[in-house]
């Protein structure tokens, strides 16, 4: 299949990942290689799956360590290989503290602490944050480094240990659904409605790079949202476009959104 045929299904800025993923698929199919990836976001996992489906001799399995994992590692292998027993190389980093302020830390505080140690985002899976601390799913090869180096999260002294997946304290996020009526599907308009803030208050953080749409940084307030998009704004929260229900009599768009709580 030509590269042009592959690219037309994806966004131009996804080209470099599409190239990498297609190479993994070809190597599995044609050279009988088995590859385990780092953590992929849902969009990357979707691309990899779509590409593997186009090659009859390759297969992909995904696992993120939790039952509803967003970020997952993949194994790409020749289609004849049995993958049930393949080790995904995921462990739980248990971050805890005797400091009561740990109950105030959020997802961004823990992620910032990990990235601040020079860890690449693709070595980190989902983070399960509770009052007691955080269970972060990580690639097992960075466990020892983190035990030696992670001493703080957002100015709170922490202890870290590595535990097996069977000990994961999973926090499942629930969606609070609402139907909103918007003039257009522009990011700033939809986000200001969901977070009940004026549009000017929403535009500044978007332009400052604090917003991601389906795991990609977006700095353009007029970026059009589509059904299925997950929008996260640092300091405000996350929501998902569940369904675009159509136009009201006044010409506004009815949209069903779910806010992560």
Image: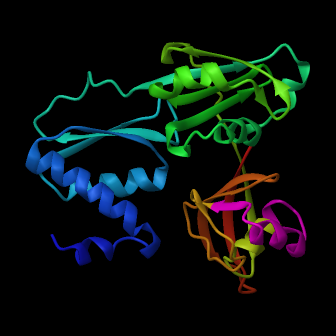
200 inside magenta stretch: yes
**Is 234 placed above or below 97 here?**
below
**Is 128 placed above or below 47 here?**
above
Residue 171 pos. (x, y %) = 65, 28
Question: Is any atom of residue 154 visible in this view?
Answer: yes
7 inside magenta stretch: no
Picture quarter containing residue 117?
top right
**Is 165 placed above or below 112 here?**
above
Residue at the image point whose x is 65% and y is 60% from the top: 212
Circle count:
0
Q: Nearer the viewer, residue 201 or 207?
A: 207
Q: Which residues are magenta?
A: 193-212
Residue at the image point whose x is 50% and y is 44% from the top: 122
Quarter holding the C terminus is top right
Residue at the image point whose x is 89% and y is 69% from the top: 201
Residue 92 pos. (x, y %) = 55, 21
Residue 188 pos. (x, y %) = 76, 73
Quarter holding the N terminus is bottom left
Residue at the image point whose x is 40% and y is 26% from the top: 89
Give the side of residue 226 with respect to residue 192, left or right.
Answer: left
């Amino acid at each position: 299949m030509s590269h042009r045929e592959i690219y037309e299904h994806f966004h131009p800025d996804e080209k470099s990942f599409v190239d990498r993923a297609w190479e993994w698929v070809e190597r599995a199919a044609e050279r009988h290689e088995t590859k385990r990836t780092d953590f992929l976001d849902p969009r990357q996992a979707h691309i990899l799956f779509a590409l593997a489906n186009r090659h009859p001799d390759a297969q992909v399995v995904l696992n993120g360590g939790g039952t509803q994992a967003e970020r997952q590692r993949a194994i790409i292998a020749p289609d004849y290989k049995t993958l049930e027993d393949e080790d995904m190389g995921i462990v739980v980093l248990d971050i805890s503290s005797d400091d009561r302020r740990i109950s105030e830390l959020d997802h961004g505080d823990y992620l910032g602490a990990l990235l601040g140690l020079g860890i690449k985002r693709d070595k980190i899976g989902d983070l399960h944050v509770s009052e007691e601390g955080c269970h972060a799913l990580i690639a097992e090869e960075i466990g020892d480094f983190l035990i030696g180096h992670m001493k703080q999260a957002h100015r709170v002294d922490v202890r870290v240990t590595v535990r097996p997946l069977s000990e994961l304290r999973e926090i499942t996020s629930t969606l609070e659904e609402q139907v909103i009526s918007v003039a257009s599907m522009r990011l700033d308009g939809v986000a200001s409605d969901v977070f009940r803030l004026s549009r000017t208050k929403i535009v500044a953080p978007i332009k400052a790079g604090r917003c991601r749409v389906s795991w990609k940084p977006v700095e353009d307030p007029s970026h059009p949202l589509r059904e299925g998009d997950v929008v996260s704004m640092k300091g405000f929260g996350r929501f998902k476009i569940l369904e675009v229900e159509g136009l009201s009599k006044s010409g506004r768009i009815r949209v069903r959104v779910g806010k992560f709580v």
